[in-house]
Image (cartoon, rainbow, N blue to C red):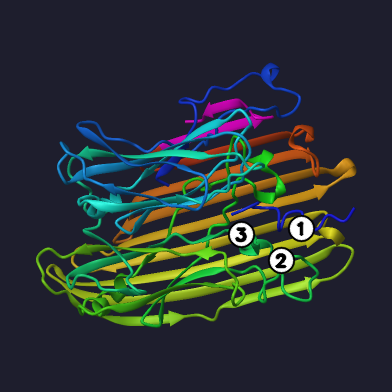
Amino acid sequence: MRCRIIMSMLAGATLLASTLLGASPAQSASSADVPAEFGTDWHDPVTAAPPVPKPGGTSCDVTVAEAQFRDFTPYKGTYAPPRGCGDRWSKVVLRLDGKVKGRQYDRLGYLHIGGVEVFRTSTPQPSPDGIEWSVEKDVTRYSDTLRRAQPVEMLIGNVVDDTYTGIIDVKVTLTFYAGRPDAARTPDRVLTLQDETLTTPRNSERVVAEVYATGSGGGCEEYWYLTVPDPAPYSCKADDGPYREVQIKVDGQLAGIAAPFPTVWTGGWSNPFLWYVIPGPRAFDIKPVEYDLTPFAGLLNDGRPHRVEVSVVGVPEGQTGWSTPVNVLVWQDAKSKHVSGALTEVRAGDLTNSSTYTPGSEHRLNTEGSHRLSVAGYLNTSHGRVATTVKRALTNTSVHTWADGENPDGLEAAWTDNETVIVDGRGPSRTTRTHRTYTMDGTTTLGTGDRLRTVLTLGDQAGVTETADGRRTAWSLLDDTYTGDATYTANVPRDQRHAVGTTSERYRLFGSGGCYDRSLVSVQGVLTEDNDGC
């Protein structure tokens, strides 16, 4: 049998301050409770990520959306601010509660409030008996939007018919905690682009853009990391291979670069049994790429609209599949009507992108990519001249191997995204260094009797160090690692798949703010381990 596109085309089927909540706390089972294979029900989805910390005191709840998604018709409603908690909040927490049963693919969704994308998510695949899941996200940064009545739009595009029966039933609420907001973390304004242009307040002194960049939709850009150039004989093609980079430009000038996170949805790598209980990192709370655009603030503060464009390097011309909605967060100088300044440097290195194909009984594609960017500017604020320099360096290495028929099909890849932000003005010079590393190592094989096996490890690591005058003031290290090994019989009805699978996740976060360490293991859909390491 020729099994084309084992991982590549079947992978998706369709399409630090958050967590997916399962049982609370999750209840683990002994090995005696584990069935010989997956049945018609399994543990509700759960991750090892920490819950969103919540302050004490007065809180107020607002329901933002409540809908059943059967097709691609968006839910539309109206949001009203809470009563009884004032209009300044120490924290705002979004919670999505969902349930679905029957048969359904993974689906991608978003929530817009006042045109601002506050949440992007994907969904778990259900059991015949049904599952429930919940996701929380800290959305305090969108407080400016939430202070006024706003239109709401939410969509989790879905297909329901005689085969795919799962109706996605969700409720989204916001919980507001009264209190003084953290001014350093909560922007004064949250803006969106109007016809790809941005007009900032003239007294802006810090500007950050966030882009919810996702490759999705069932085509090859959903698993862009597996694409190959000609003449390599593989089902997913891209002229320049698998290197991707999310760029943002201001008035045509390169202003920011970033490595996209290689998200794997819950149908990914041809094997939904990997994700039924423990999803891959970020699958249910898609974090935006962030760019510090403060060096451009002197240019932006002229009161005129400026063109802001986002693009993804490496996507073949005319190829769809990437979504890149943009929010812009602005902090203002309350003592100035106009903050003047200038952009002093934009220095981009050469973008390196090399994919080398080696033919043979084992086809091989070696890819190496890298790019550097440094931007700098200054602002004349009410508290003196402040200069900001942002440096970013990206690398990507991958080895993609496959045999004829794309069986087996394997990938070992790593991405790094290193960022340094230096702010120099009145007071000590402050530097924030962030080192991000994303890793993927997996193989899918179709063996005897059409037994399809996927073995996969995913990693999401980040280290952050803050210094003032060279002295460390805060630091943190994150290591979120997922591992899975699942096998089932392909090309047969669901009740004949005889699936088995073991998945695990360990989420470690420690530093000057404390320690968190939790490990989960599931076997045949049963949660067998739930351990706290701190």
Q: Is residue 533 above or below residue 293?
A: above
Q: Earlier in the sequence, mark 1 or mark 2?
A: 1
Label 3 and label 2: CA atoms lie apart by 10 Å
Residue on which disc 2 sits: 236
Q: Position of residue 275 (x, y in %)?
A: 62, 40
Residue on which disc 1 sits: 5
- Circles 1 and 2: CB atoms closer than 8 Å: yes
Q: Is residue 522 left or right of residue 25?
A: right
- Residue closest to the far front: 162
Q: Which residues are magenta?
A: 515-534
- Residue 337 appears in the picture as rendered: yes
Q: Is residue 376 above or below residue 65?
A: below
Amino acid type at circle 3 is: Glu
Say which element carries label 3: helix
Q: Position of residue 96 (x, y in %)?
A: 41, 39
Numbered badge on residue 148: none
Dot 1 surroundings within 10 Å: few (below 14), some, or many (20 or more)?
some
On the image, which quarter does residue 227 sit in? bottom right
Asked whether 188 or 169 is in front, the reply is 169
Q: Is residue 421 above or below residue 54?
A: below
Q: Earlier in the sequence, mark 3 or mark 1?
A: 1
Q: Is residue 399 left or right of residue 338?
A: right
Amino acid type at circle 2 is: Cys
Q: Earlier in the sequence, mark 3 or mark 2?
A: 3
Q: Which secondary structure is most common in the magenta stretch?
A: strand
Is 530 in the magenta? Answer: yes
Residue on which disc 3 sits: 222
Say which element carries label 1: loop
Dot 2 surroundings within 10 Å: few (below 14), some, or many (20 or more)?
many
